[in-house]
Amino acid sequence: MPKIKLIVNGREREFEADERETLLDVLRNRLGMTGSRFGCGAEQCGSCSVLIDGEDKPSCAIEVGTLKGKSILTVEGLGTPEKPHPLQSAFLEKQAGQCGYCLSGILVCAKALLDRNPSPSRTEIAEALSWHLCRCGAHNRILDAVALAASRMQVPA
Amino acid sequence: MIPQSLQANPVLERWISFPSPGKVRVAFGKVEYGQGVMTALAQIVADELDVAMERLDVVNAASGDVPDEGLTVGSMSIEMSGAAVRAAAAEVRALFLAEAAARFGCSADVLNILDGEFVRSGVSTGLGYWTLASAIDLKRAPEGKARWKTPDRHRIVGKSQPRSDLPVKIFGGGFIQDIPLKDVTHARVLRQPGYKAQIATLDEAAIRKAARGDIDIVREGAFIAFLSKSERAVSLAVAAAEQHVTWNEARVGVPALSEPVALKTLPATPWEGGAPPPEPSNRRKHKASYGRPYIAHGSMGPSHGIARFEGETLKVWTHAQGVYPIRGMLARITGLPPEKIQVEHTQGPGCYGHNGADDATCDAAAIAMRRPGQTIRVQWRREDEFGYEPLGTAMHIELSGEIDSSGRLVDFSSEIWSGPHVSRGTALVEAALAPGTPPPPPMIIPFFSGGRLNATPSYDIAATRIKENVVTPPMRTSSLRGLGGPVNTYACECFIDEMAGIAGTDPLAYRLAMTSDPRAVAVLEHIGVLSGWSTRSAGGSGEGLGLAYCRHRDRGAYIAVAVSLVVEKEIRLQRMWCVTDCGLVINPDGAKNQIEGGMIMAASWTLKEQVRLGGSGIASTAWDDYPILRFNEVPPIDVELIDQRNSAPLGAGEISLGPTMAAIANAVAHALGVRIRDLPYTRERIARQLLSN
Ligand code: FES
Ligand code: FES
């Protein structure tokens, strides 16, 4: 099997994989990063989404061979319980989630949004997240949490 | 009186113990799936024992480790399990205080507890739960004598508490799919298209070639599974298998049976109850019929099961709704005695009822029994979940009513056609291993049917009667959030609005005039205030404001919902409000989260959702074929809880669905000036309705 190099959460990772393996399978099975989740395998739900060079993309159908040298950000790269990203803190504060299965993809999507638009309106947040599905109906709390994180990130620390 | 769940598990230590200094071990028979039950139950225990929440170690639900409380369903966890843990904790507290009092030669009444330490006249006594733990044997049955705290003494109950299950999920873990397993064998199952189907041909060579890696094939009867150390190989194998298998007697999905009214054409078992038929009269009468199609649970993650058989023991990880019921099924399927089966619950994505979780667990176990020593991980595909999970049944409801000269509804009849709302206890793998075995017939329980929940409107109506026809549907159906309750409430509350129209009365005033229960009046009046009901327009302008009310299952929470929306080519929700009285609320923020989530799910059912039958069963097998409400379609929502801390707690998990469906419907009728009665209210249906007028 060929060696493939990716930058995952800022770290260079080299591993053996079939070039046609999906990025999601590689993340979960080869790199042991479970944050990106399998929801449909058809780019229709957002559970698996990660940032590829800063853009929110489903990882469930993209072949890892097409990503050489690209930079991937997963929810694990956002923050840790000790050092949470402001989005993660805001999600906890707003209790934005029920089952939580959709949240990894939504968190990285929100990160991409705030990177390009630091103070989005409710409508802009909703539009950015609109391809992400949440079956539990945590939408409003999620929108509030993203807005809260945005407002905090505006204030220089 | 000793609560039922505690009677069934009558050893205090099974619920509460003090195994290490400063810690309280608590065990519940209910399981967490994002509804926050663990947090709420822990609040009850912490409050009753007077210890800080942080001291509680809640045991993960595993067979043997936790009390048997059956399934976690029907918004009953707080009512049932909450009562049990409160009683158990009160007893434990009383035992410890009595021991301390005996040592001091004082009355237990003069002792207080501060975070587990016992205090007398504000001074620490040096005794506490942990110092006394060795002196008190909790391996004893509850006596049912201890009194629990009155609500005025609650310190943790009634205050919002962050959910204990959420943090791990925000940092990328926490689900059954995430359990790190060494040397796991990935598995995919090629589902049998209907219980009669038999394999005609299966081109194993072609499938192995397509898998591009080593695979092992389990084939027995009509059960086919692909195994490999490579997840990619099994994904490719199962996809290829669809092309390289032929079946005899595969089921056929008949598109016309997707419509609720088609239930009337299928064999049914009737049940009747209520008042005798109405005497002929010249009262004004009204009849209308309503339908909701089949609905998918639509968990965000397709079902998952893990199993390993080694020596004589089967170890299973499951996201089923309880560990003991599934253990019974596994015993039957594997032939093992239950004590040789260890079942550990691990959280899965929200299930909202009976989805594929039990089936995936049984798949994994059946495979593990045939491949001892391997850890088998079965992942359902999205198309498996949509195509093979038990559906929430379609329902068709015909209502008729009579109003007296004052306009009041005095006689009400409902005839319901519904598939079963509960059909647990068997798994797909059983039928596949023994093809041709028909599933058990629908269970008819005379005193309880999911299809009859909330079948009559929640008002004072002189005569009501129900006829329910339990239909054998073309697809397997089982419990979906609220069972038939939300659908009945939808129909009844649309009907009430229609009756108000016939009587020429405002819908809110009409409802208020028909209820004498002050708690009902309170939620109705308050929803009027929140939604600005008094300034509601005459209607027909394309903008609508509607409301609905019900008392959950006729004896639970009181809940009213109002919705404002605009109807253009499609329906745009502008705002939704909810007022509820669900008695004593353990975790207000948790309850609000559930109520709001239910409103959004109900809006999605109402506006968008319908499972389509076709092909070899279900034709809508991807999210693109089964749209649900999206972020840019969800309106702002206000949820208010009426403070009723002196009343018993009433479940909140599924109470908001029916009123939300009806409030949307009533708002649409207000906006359009015409009534649509069959769900979902898609763009096509609205257009058709407007054209036909
Ligand atoms: S799993 Fe990738 S979009 Fe659904
Ligand atoms: S929180 Fe369960 S799917 Fe979003």
Image (cartoon, rainbow, N blue to C red):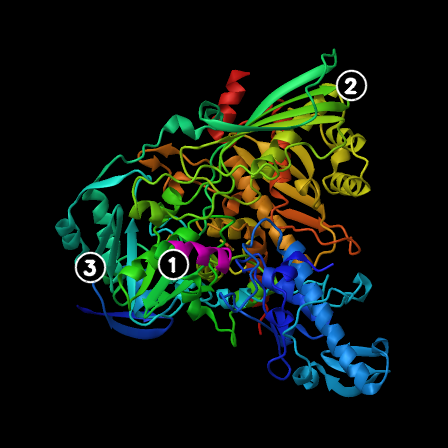
| Amino acid marked by disc 2 | Asp
Mark 1 touches mark 2? (CB < 8 Å): no
Mark 3 touches mark 1? (CB < 8 Å): no
> Going 76% across and 28% down the picture, which residue do you hit?
B510
First in sequence, mark 3 or 1: give its number. Answer: 3
Find residue B281 and report its horizontal and vertical position in percent.
Answer: 74, 12
Find residue B396 and report its horizontal and vertical position in percent.
Answer: 53, 28
Q: What range is drawn magenta here? A: B321-332
Q: Which residue is mark 3?
A: B215
Looking at the image, is B576 positioned above or below residue A147? Answer: above
Asked if residue B654 can be seen in this view, the reply is yes
| Label 3 to label 1: alpha-carbon separation | 19 Å
Q: Which residue is mark 2?
A: B404
Marks 1 & 2 on one chain: yes
Determine crowd level at label 2: few under 14, some 14-19, many 20+ residues with C-alpha closer than 10 A: some
Nearer the observer, B29 or B213: B29
Q: Is residue B331 magenta?
A: yes
Marks 3 & 1 on one chain: yes
Looking at the image, is B609 positioned above or below residue B66? Answer: above
Q: Which element is circle 2 on? A: loop
Q: Which residue is mark 1?
A: B305
| Amino acid marked by disc 1 | Gly
Marks 3 & 2 on one chain: yes
